Amino acid sequence: MTKQKKLLADSADNPRNPRKSAKSANIAVIGAGYWGKNLVRNFYKLGVLKTVCDIDKKSLLYLKRIYPEINITQNINKVVIDKDIKGVVIAAPAVTHYKLTKKFLLAGKDVFVEKPLALKLEEAKKLVKLAQKKKQILMVGHLLLYHPAVVKLKQIVKNGTLGKIRYIYSNRLNFGKLRTEENILWSFAPHDISVIIELFGKLPNKIYAHGMSWLNKNIADVTLSYFEFNQNQAAHIFVS
């Protein structure tokens, strides 16, 4: 059994009675805010959640009331040194993703990190190489790739029902959260990029992007990106 399959088997140990097997509680969630609380809920229901770490004490105490069996901490190092924790889920601000992911990979733990993996290409490459060197799982949370509609669309494209796909465009508009670290391209577009790459089955060979900022200086609120693929295929993504 591969390492990934074993982890999934452990996670599915007893979803109806999540705390029945203490041995299966080997996951920690870092960041329990806007999106992290959803991950906390799901990993708890799977029966694998041991610890939640967040700097906000009020959020931790609130989660402790809902899930009294879990451990809570504001100290990230307690998660690092806990040998019972085999995997870490990172839902902290994007600006912290690189340092946190690196810290846990070096500690010998598998890591699931929400998008984006890092805010710099070189940092992302370093994390991939580190995970390969340590033989640890490193997975980015591109949840749309597992959405039933996207899975079905990929099947339709693959079986040729739509013919040869030449161009894909995507518009993603939302009020959402006002970000101060990452721009709208980092915050919104990774979903669309992941789906487009999945549908074309290849990486683009040319990328152009243009953005404008109004609410926060140098933090783009609107971006238009254009992607060229080989075999005369292309795509654009508009996010705002």
Image (cartoon, rainbow, N blue to C red):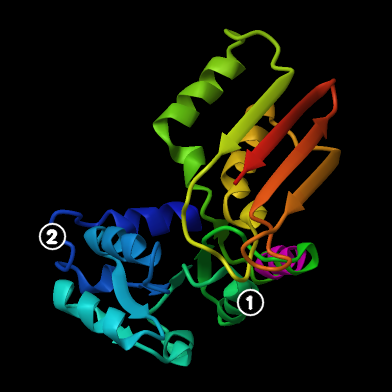
In the image, residue 223 sits, relative to residue 42, either above or below, namely above
Of marks 1 and 2, the one in the foreground: 1
Is residue 163 found left or right of 115 in the rendered image? right
Q: Which residue is painted at 72% across and 21% down in the image? A: 167
Residue 72 at x, y percent in the picture: 30, 84
User: Callout 1: 10 Å neighbours few (<14), some, many (20+)?
Assistant: some
Quadrant in which residue 41 is drawn: bottom left
Residue 154 at x, y percent in the picture: 55, 24
Question: Nearest the camera: 9 or 142?
Answer: 142
Is residue 17 found left or right of 136 in the rendered image? left
Q: Amino acid at mark 2?
A: Asn
Q: Which residue is painted at 39% across and 81% down in the image? A: 54
Find out whether residue 125 is within the magenta segment: yes
Quadrant in which residue 78 is drawn: bottom left
Q: Amino acid at mark 1?
A: Lys
Q: Which mark is residue 17?
A: 2
Residue 6 at x, y percent in the picture: 41, 56
In the image, residue 191 sits, relative to residue 7, either above or below, namely above
Q: Earlier in the sequence, mark 1 or mark 2?
A: 2
Question: Nearest the camera: 169 or 149?
Answer: 169
Find out whether residue 92 is within the magenta segment: no
The residue to which callout 1 is attached is: 102
Residue 150 at x, y percent in the picture: 49, 30
User: Callout 2: 10 Å neighbours few (<14), some, many (20+)?
Assistant: few
Q: Which residue is painted at 64% across and 65% down in the image? A: 182
Q: Which residue is painted at 61% across and 59% down in the image? A: 116
Question: Nearest the camera: 231 or 227?
Answer: 227
Is residue 50 found left or right of 155 in the rendered image? left
Residue 48 visible here: yes
Numbered range of the magenta stretch: 124-131
